[in-house]
Amino acid sequence: MIYEEDLMFDYVEYTTVDGPNKKHDVEVYALSTCGFCKRALAFLRDQGIAHRYIHVDLIPIDVKNKIKESLHEQFKEHVSFPFAVIDGKTTLIGFLEPDWRKTLLD
Amino acid sequence: MKPKTIEETKTFTQMVARKQGWVLTADSALYEDLVQGLNTNWNRYGYYLCPCRDTEGSKEADQDVVCPCDYAKADIAEYGHCYCSLYWSESFAKSGKAPQGIPERRPYK
């Protein structure tokens, strides 16, 4: 169950993927054209990690820029993709499988 | 603008690799995904925006990340492959290593 207050941005629609592993709240910003974004989302799915994602190249550019600015402000990180927000507190940027594995499965 | 086919986009990537002395990713599934992404970007924006970068809204603003991007040469020298991993150095291809996400070299705007 995702509560409205858990969402970073309530003005965009995320795709929710359920899974048995709900240890962390995982929100992913991705590009529909990007190979590593695709692999990151496949990793989450294959590992049964519940998550939600949005392809930011498929939403209006002003909305995307607003999201990027907010993410940058909140996490003090350059926004590149995939950009995952874990438990609303930490980030995984780019798909380095060992890092994702360590953060999400250990 | 006339849409490009997947085959035309594949030919483009082959020409770039040959001209630059790089090789194409040996990961065939990744290659298909990246060609699909590049093709989508051409047909969406009118230029081959890197499939792993998002548009700034115009060709002028995206100029440095039009494939092959301005950062590919340095990334291939340092990591063996470009940011999206479409292009590899010959030595990386021979190493048998798998590509992975690398840091974004593009200055933040």
Image (tube, coloured by chain):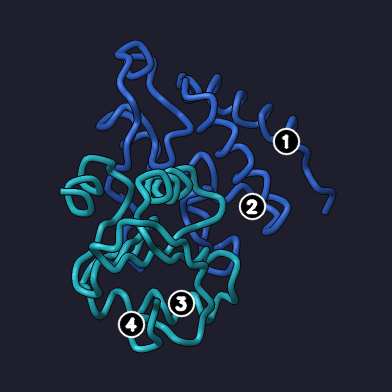
Amino acid type, residue under disc 2 in the picture: Asn
The image quadrant of residue B16 is top right
Amino acid type, residue under disc 1 in the picture: Ile
Residue lying farthest to the front in this orientation = A20
Q: Relative to B106, say whether A3 is above or below.
A: below
Q: Can you identify the residue that label 2 sits on?
A: B41
**SS state under label 3:** helix
Q: Could you say which disc has been placed on residue B6 in the image?
A: 1
Q: Colour of chain B?
A: blue
**Nearer to us: label 4 or label 2:** 4
Q: Can you identify the residue that label 4 sits on?
A: A6
Where is residue A51 shown, x and y percent of the image? 39, 63
Which chain does cyan denote in the image? A
Disc 4 crowd rating (10 Å Cα; few below 14, some 14-19, many 20+) is: few
The answer to whether marks 4 and 3 mark residues whose Cβ atoms lie closer than 8 Å is no
Amino acid type, residue under disc 3 in the picture: Asn
Report the residue at 31% width, 59% height from top. Answer: B107
Q: Could you say which disc has been placed on residue A65 in the image?
A: 3
Q: Relative to A104, say whether B81 is above or below.
A: above
Instruction: For marks 4 and 1, give the CA distance.
Output: 40 Å
